[in-house]
Image (cartoon, rainbow, N blue to C red):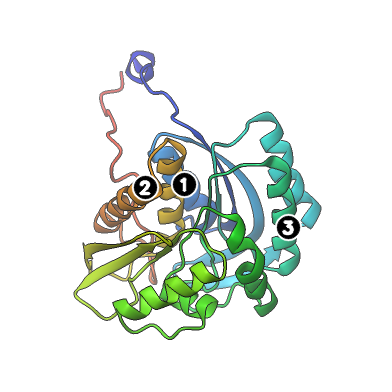
Amino acid sequence: MLKNQLINLKLKSKILIIAGSDSSGGAGIQADIKTVTSLGSYAMTAITAITSQNTTGVLSISKVPLNEIKNQIEFTSKDIKPDAIKIGMLHSSKVINVVLNSLIKIKIKKIILDPVMVAKGGKKLIDNKSIGLIRSKLMKKVSLITPNIPEAEILSKVKIKSIDDMITAGNKLLKKGAKNVLIKGGHLNSKQVFDIYLNKEEIKIFKSKKIRTKNTHGTGCTLSSAIATYFSCGKTLKKSCSMAINYVNHSIGAGPKYGEGHGPINHISLLNVNKKFR
C-alpha cells in the first residue's frame, strides 16, 4: 500500500526561502522548493518578485508589495520557525531593507545568500543601489554568500580571470564583512570547474568535471538551497558546500533538456522513487 511505502519518510529540517518566482520552474522559488524537498526537508517561502520567463530569457518582472514580503517572512516564521534561511533575488534597496529588518526580528542564525544579479540570458535583475546595500549591510548578516564570477566581480570590484583572482575577490569580500564566501567558478574558461570556499581561517578549492551543456538554468539557486538544507541539518558549512556541489553536478548531468534556451536541471536526480504503487 502507498501508506506503507511512505511511512518511513521524515522531514529533516525547515527552510525559509526568500526569493523571486520563475514561471518556467527552473530557477528561483520553484527550484528552491524542489531542491529542499528532494533533499528531505520542508520548504517555506517569501516571494519578493514574480517573473515571466522561459528558457530563452526574462519577459517581465512584477514587484511584490513590501509589506507582503515582510508579512510572508515574519508571519510564517512566527508559526513554523526555520532552521535556516536561503535568500535569493532581492531586486531593490527597499526590499533589501525590509528583509534586513525582518531577519533581525526572527533571529535565525543560519542564512545563505545567493546574490542574484543577472539572469542566465543576460537580463539585469537588480539595480546599482541594491548592489551597494548587499555589499555594505546584507553580506555582513549572513553565514555564507555564494556569488558566481560575474557577481563576485561586481561585489569585490576585482576582475576575475583565474583561480588566484577568485581568491583575491573572496578575500576582499571577507574584508568587507562577509563571514564565509563560496565563489562559483563555472564561468572560468577551463576543463574543470573550480569552486572556492574561504573564510579568515581557511581556503578550500572544490574541483569538478565541467559538463558541456547549455542547460544550467537555476544552478545558483539550487546550489544555495542545497547548502542551506545540509547546513540546517547540522553539517558544517564546508561540508554543506561539498555535498551541495555534488548534488548540483549530478542534477546537471541528468538534465531533461527542456526548452530552446538555457534549460533546467533535474532536481530529483538523487530521489529514489518507488514505482510499485498499488
Q: Quadrant of residue 125?
A: bottom right
Residue matched to label 1 = 228
Q: Which of marks 3 and 1 is nearer the N terminus?
A: 3
Q: Quadrant of residue 215?
A: bottom left
Residue matched to label 3 = 64
- Callouts 2 and 1 close, C-beta under 8 Å: yes
Q: Quadrant of the N terminus?
A: top left
User: Residues under labels 2 and 1: Cα distance?
Assistant: 8 Å
Q: Which of marks 2 and 1 is nearer the N terminus?
A: 1
Mark 2: secondary structure? helix
Residue matched to label 2 = 240
Instruction: Find residue 127 and report its horizontal and vertical position in percent.
Output: 66, 76
- Left or right: 185 as drawn, with respect to 180: left
Please determine whether, in this image, residue 135 is positioned above or below residue 159: above
The residue lying at 66 percent from left, 60 percent from top is 49
Mark 1: secondary structure? helix
